[in-house]
Image (spheres, grey):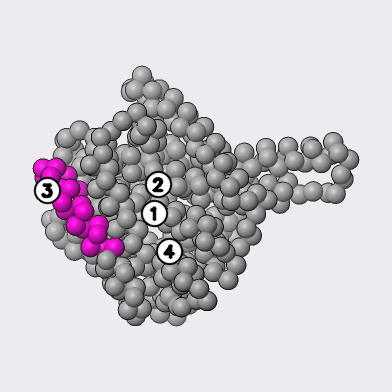
Amino acid sequence: MPRVISIDILRGFVMVLMVLDHVRIFFSNANFDPLDLTQSNVPLFLTRWVTHLCAPTFIFLAGIGAYLSLKRGKTKQQLFQFLLLRGCWFIFLDLTVVRFSWRFNLTDIFSVAGVLWAIAWSMIFLAAIIYLPTRIIAAIGILLVVGHNLFDNIQAEQLGNIGWLWTILHERNMIEPIPGFRLFILYPLIPWIGVIALGYAFGKLFEIEKIRRLQLLRKIGLSMIIAFIIIRGINIYGDPNPWSIQSNFPDTLLSFINCHKYPPSFLYLLITLGLAIILLYFLERTKINYYLKPLIILGQEPLFFYIIHVYLIHLTAILFAFSRYVIRLFTFSHSGMSLEIKAVQYNLPMVYLISILITLILYIICNYFTKYKKKHRGKWWLNYL
C-alpha cells in the first residue's frame, strides 16, 4: 500500500498550527491564558483554541500509520518492536533534547512530560495490545476516551503512596521520580493511549474503496461534531469545566467550545478529532497540487520537525531580543532591559508574521533533510529522525 498523501498533508497542517502556538508562547504580549475569557479577546482565544487540533491529530494519525504499516509488509512482531523502541526513544528525546530547547538550561533539575511523552507511551501501549483483534483495540480506545471523565474527582493526593501513578495517568501535576529531580506531567496518559488505539482501528477505513471511505469519513466526522454539540449543550458529562452564559453571545460561544485539555476531556477529543476527520475527508477529495507540497514535506518529517522547531523559535526570540537591546543601547537608553521580557512584547498580527517566517525556514530545512535521507538511505542514524 503506498503512502496516504492526505494523512501527510493533515499532519503537516497541524504542525504549522503547532508552530503558531509555540511562537505565541515566546513572542506574544498577552501575559495571561488566552482561553481566559475575563482577559482574552476573540482573535487571541481562537488562535489558541485552533491549535488544540495538534496533539489529538498527531496521536490519532500515529495510530493510523501503525495500522497501515502492516499493510505495507510489516509483520506484527516487527511493528511491536518498532513501536516499543520508538516509544523509548521519544521518552529520551522529550526529557533531554526537547527539554533543553525550551529553557536552554543544562543545570535545571526540572523537566516537563509533554506531547512527545504522550506519543511515546501511547506507542508503547499500542505495542502491548497489537496482537488483540482490531475490534477489541477499538473498544479499548472508546472506553478510555468516553469513560475516563468518570474519574475526574479522584485526586492523586487521595491515593497516598501510589498518587504519583495517578498523576502520570490522569492528573496534571508534579512528581519527583528521583530525589532532587522534579517532573511536571503536562500530558497525563489517559486518554491519549485511547486515541492511538482508535487511530489504529480507524486505519481499516483506508483498505476500502475510496467512494465508500469518503462517505464514512464525512459521516463519522459530522456525527462526532453533532454529538459534541448535543452532549456539551446538556452540560452534565464529558468535561470537568461546564460552559456558562457570558455577558455577550460571542463569549458564550467561546465558553461552549472551551474544553479541558490536561488531560483531554471526552468532549475535547470529540470536537478536535471530529474536525480532524472532516479535514481528512476534504483532503481525500482534493486533487494534490503544487501548493500542497510544503505540507506534504512537513508531514513526512514529523519527528525531525518537532525536534528543531522549538530551537529555531527560541533562537529567533533571542535574536529579536538582542536586536532590540542593541537599538536601545545605540539610542543611549540604559534601562537595564531584560532580553527575556523584551522578546515577548509583540501583538497578535506580528505573532502570525513571525510564525509564517519560521514555518518557511522549517520547510526549507525539512525539504533539504528529505532529499538528504533519499540520498543516504543506508545511514543508520537517520532511522532515529
Which quadrant does the N terminus fall into? Answer: top left
* Residue 45 versus residue 93 in the image, above or below: below
Which residue position is annotated with label 3? 212
Residue 293 is drawn in which quadrant? top left
Q: Alpha carbon of mark 3 to alpha carbon of mark 4: how far?
A: 33 Å
Please report whichever mark, 4 or 2, sits nearer to the chain's N-terminal start: 2
Q: Which residues are magenta?
A: 202-225
* Residue 5 versus residue 38 in the image, above or below: above
Q: Secondary structure at mark 4?
A: loop
Please report whichever mark, 1 or 3, sits nearer to the chain's N-terminal start: 1
Q: Alpha carbon of mark 1 to alpha carbon of mark 2: how far?
A: 7 Å
Residue 24 visible in the current orientation: yes
Closer to the camera, 170 or 86? 170
**Type of residue at label 2?**
Val
Residue 128 is drawn in which quadrant? bottom left
The dot on residue 53 is: 1
Please report whichever mark, 2 or 3, sits nearer to the chain's N-terminal start: 2
Contact, mark 1 vs mark 3 (Cβ under 8 Å): no
Which residue position is annotated with label 4? 261
Q: Residue at x 54, y 69 (%)?
A: 37
Q: Which label lies toward us, 1 or 3?
A: 3
Please report whichever mark, 3 or 4, sits nearer to the chain's N-terminal start: 3
Q: Alpha carbon of mark 1 to alpha carbon of mark 3: how far?
A: 25 Å
Which residue position is annotated with label 2? 14
As for residue 88 lying within the magenta part, the answer is: no
The dot on residue 119 is: none
